[in-house]
Amino acid sequence: MSELKFATRLNSFASGAHLYWQDLQGKPSVIQMIERAATVKGLTHLDLNYPQHLTSDIQTLRQKIADVGLAVNGMQMRWDAPEFKIGAFTNPDPAIRRKAIELTKRGIDTGREFGSTLMTLWMGQDGFDYCFQADYKKIWEDAVSAVREIAEYAPDCDISIEYKPNEPRAFSIFPNVTTCLLAVEEAGCPNLGITLDFAHVLYANEIPAYAAAMVARRSRLLGLDCNDGWGKRDDGLMVASVNPKATLEFLWQMQRDGYAGAYYFDTFPDASGLDPVREAETNIATVKRLIKLCEKLDDSQALLGAISRQDAVASQQIINDIMFAQ
């Protein structure tokens, strides 16, 4: 348990800024958000958005993160510039597409300077909104070839695709686990893998543990975004707050498949004004408790037997006894 890595979304720590920084004018700086995140008990890592969070020079940020006792888990690409609105890797303008690819390479280089070898690609701008808007085979090939080029650029780094059904585009180029697995297979690079965001998986009408099992079967699970939601949108709620059994099964499946990465909390306390420090500490405590329950599941021959027989009644009784023990 002590070796677990817990990382979090840095932008969460702008939540309730006027209460935490009473003299603050405007939004908190990246440095200020790092300092606030460091007050979370049990937090070990941060993820940085590139280039969004590189508002200070690299040396200053690196020193600040080290000084507060944290480390960088990975870099997450954000193509926020207006020219990327109709696509980064799938942009119809070859010059803008090239700019997106080169920006991603610089993000990988920056991650190395923080001691990180993980780059997460959430390609939210890549997709389409209307019938007859896109040549589907062309944008697919553009997306896959860009991912391949980036992976080949940094064979020493893990490049992970994070999928989401839509938003900001009406339909994403990689909307679910199946398309991601196909893209990874077509790209054909050993350092490629997939990040599963629990709320995105629900939103894609998938079963989280099943998605994790398919990733382990055909690729590698390189990243995990812990959160929860009602399955209608990307809610970013606290871990296991809506779907505790599905979360337990998800974590158990990942552990059985050998996941050793960070437990990253992609939650949105800022959406409803929650205290991000208390929220993150609750997420950490929840994951720790669920992992302890996973150990009990590992020891349950009765559960394994019920699963082998696909005996849902028996398995639910066993899970209820473990989760709801008096």
Image (spheres, rainbow, N blue to C red):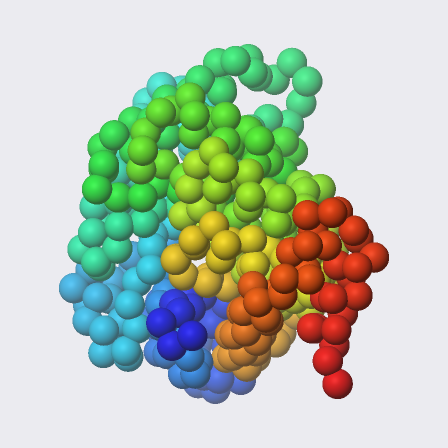
Residue 320's quadrant in the figure? Answer: bottom right
Residue 226 coordinates in the image, percent (x, y): 54, 60
Residue 169 coordinates in the image, percent (x, y): 60, 35
Q: Is residue 261 left or right of residue 233?
A: left
Residue 285 coordinates in the image, percent (x, y): 54, 78
For image coordinates 71% across by 42% down, the residue present is 205
Q: Is residue 264 left or right of residue 313?
A: left
* 128 vs 262: above or below: above
- Image quarter (top left, top right, bottom left or bottom right) of the C terminus: bottom right
Camera-side residue of 284 and 234: 284
Name the outermost residue toward the right: 313
For image coordinates 46% across by 61% down, the residue present is 264
* 116 vs 67: above or below: above
Number of numbered callouts drawn: 0
* 156 vs 3: above or below: above
Camera-side residue of 177 and 34: 177
For image coordinates 23% across by 37% down, the residue present is 154
* 232 vs 38: above or below: above
Camera-side residue of 68 and 288: 288
Q: Is residue 243 left or right of residue 167?
A: right
> Quick check: can you spot residue 276?
no
Residue 172 coordinates in the image, percent (x, y): 58, 32
For image coordinates 23% across by 36% down, the residue present is 155
> Quick check: can you spot residue 210?
yes
- Image quarter (top left, top right, bottom left or bottom right) of the N terminus: bottom left
Camera-side residue of 156 and 23: 156
